[in-house]
Image (cartoon, rainbow, N blue to C red):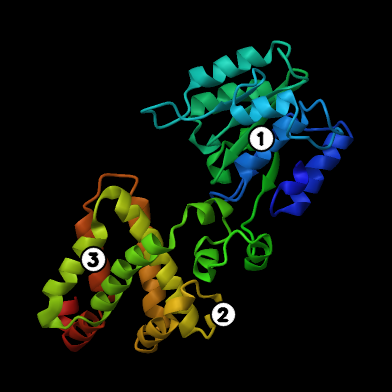
């Protein structure tokens, strides 16, 4: 047990441990990076190291009373500030209460630790309220901000924290830690152990078939098959939750098809259906997949508002269809 059990980003772990050993640990930290790569786990480990009673200053045992309480979420000096039920952002009252409590001496442990997750959902008022604690931090108090979007945090907050940008694990690292023997899942998780643990191969393949059928129909449908194209688009649009998942899958498939077009087959995710993807790739152009990926980015941005999901998916399908391109090319007047 201890920091050695953390998987990936070894330079960050060593840097943190060095600061703990030297008793020069920063009062404000930002852990940034994609979902599921260990940011929250590392923050919890830091909280243990700052309060463990049975280990060296740069580590934690994981079994003493403070470590077990932190794991259980019952340690009075270690708290997580997150989104309250039915809220869309971290409120100023939550931050003010945390700052008030930081002013008191620890109740049980050596240090008070507040983990703010997700810190990019601090509103402007709550982020500004946090500045005082970062500018004049009480002794034995630490703030750890966790975010997927570093630049969504106010520059004034970022400038008062030390930042650690966590990166996804490589395929070799994932294989070495032997979390799964399924090569498809190892590739599909994109370096995120959190994602890997949540993936189910059967569910993934069932959803992927919907997406691949949509792409094949969208690309090759003739004029008299547009009804099939619209039906495939409707299946992809689904519910709002399904739609977000399907957009992510579309992005992965577009990348695979572009890699195949560019002769980088070793980088594809969907290795188990490579022949099917190769056939699709051979009959299209790299420009098509780049254009579709760009439009997909527009669709993902639109998810933040109330959008007509079926309409957006139909537009994507029409953008993908090679026969629509031919019709427009053959009828320049209609394309204007």
Q: How far apart are the two marked residues, 3 and 2, measured between alpha carbons?
A: 31 Å
Secondary structure type for disc 3:
helix
Q: Is residue 83 above or below residue 268?
A: above
Task: Identify the residue position indicated by label 1 in the image.
Answer: 44
Residue 49: image quadrant is: top right
Q: Is residue 42 above or below residue 137?
A: below
Residue 102 horizontal side relative to residue 80, left or right: right
Secondary structure type for disc 1:
helix
Residue 191 horizontal side relative to residue 259, left or right: right
Q: How far apart are the two marked residues, 3 and 1, measured between alpha carbons?
A: 45 Å
The numbered dot on residue 187 is none
Residue 212 x, y percent position in the rendering:
32, 72
Residue 261 x, y percent position in the rendering:
46, 84
The numbered dot on residue 266 is 2
In the picture, the quarter occupied by the C terminus is bottom left
In the picture, the quarter occupied by the N terminus is top right
Residue 197 x, y percent position in the rendering:
52, 53
Question: Residue at (43%, 63%) from the top-left corner?
Answer: 201
The residue mark sitting in front, 3 or 2, is 2
Residue 254 x, y percent position in the rendering:
41, 72
Q: Is residue 276 above or below residue 182?
A: below
The residue mark sitting in front, 3 or 1, is 1
Q: Earlier in the sequence, mark 3 or mark 1?
A: 1
Task: Identify the residue position indicated by label 3 in the image.
Answer: 315
Residue 17 horizontal side relative to residue 244, left or right: right
Q: Earlier in the sequence, mark 1 or mark 2?
A: 1
């Amino acid at each position: 047990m201890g920091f050695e059990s953390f998987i990936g980003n070894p330079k960050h772990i060593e840097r943190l441990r060095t600061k703990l050993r030297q008793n020069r640990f920063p009062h404000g930290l930002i852990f940034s990076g994609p979902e599921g790569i260990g940011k929250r786990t590392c923050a919890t480990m830091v909280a243990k190291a700052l309060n463990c009673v049975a280990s060296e200053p740069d580590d934690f045992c994981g079994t003493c009373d403070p470590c077990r309480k932190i794991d259980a979420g019952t340690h009075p000096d270690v708290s997580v500030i997150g989104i309250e039920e039915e809220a869309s952002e971290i409120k100023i009252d939550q931050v003010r209460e945390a700052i008030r409590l930081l002013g008191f001496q620890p109740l049980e442990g050596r240090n008070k630790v507040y983990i703010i997750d997700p810190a990019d959902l601090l509103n402007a008022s709550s982020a500004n309220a946090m500045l005082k604690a970062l500018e004049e931090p009480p002794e034995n108090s630490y703030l750890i901000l966790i975010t997927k979007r570093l630049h969504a945090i106010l520059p004034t907050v970022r400038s008062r924290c030390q930042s650690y940008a966590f990166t996804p694990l490589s395929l070799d690292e994932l294989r070495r830690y032997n979390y799964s023997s399924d090569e498809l899942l190892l590739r599909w998780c994109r370096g995120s152990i959190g994602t890997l643990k949540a993936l189910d191969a059967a569910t993934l393949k069932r959803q992927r078939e919907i997406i691949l059928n949509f792409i094949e129909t969208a690309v090759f449908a003739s004029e008299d098959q547009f009804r099939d194209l619209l039906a495939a688009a409707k299946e992809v649009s689904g519910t709002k939750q399904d739609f977000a998942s399907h957009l992510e899958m579309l992005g992965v498939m577009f990348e695979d098809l572009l890699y195949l077009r560019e002769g980088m087959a070793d980088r594809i995710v969907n290795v188990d259906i490579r022949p099917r993807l190769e056939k699709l790739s051979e009959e299209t152009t790299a420009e098509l997949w780049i254009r579709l990926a760009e439009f997909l980015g527009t669709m993902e941005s639109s998810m933040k508002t109330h959008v007509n999901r079926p309409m957006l998916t139909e537009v994507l399908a029409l953008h993908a269809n090679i026969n629509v391109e031919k019709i427009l090319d053959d009828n320049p007047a209609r394309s204007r």
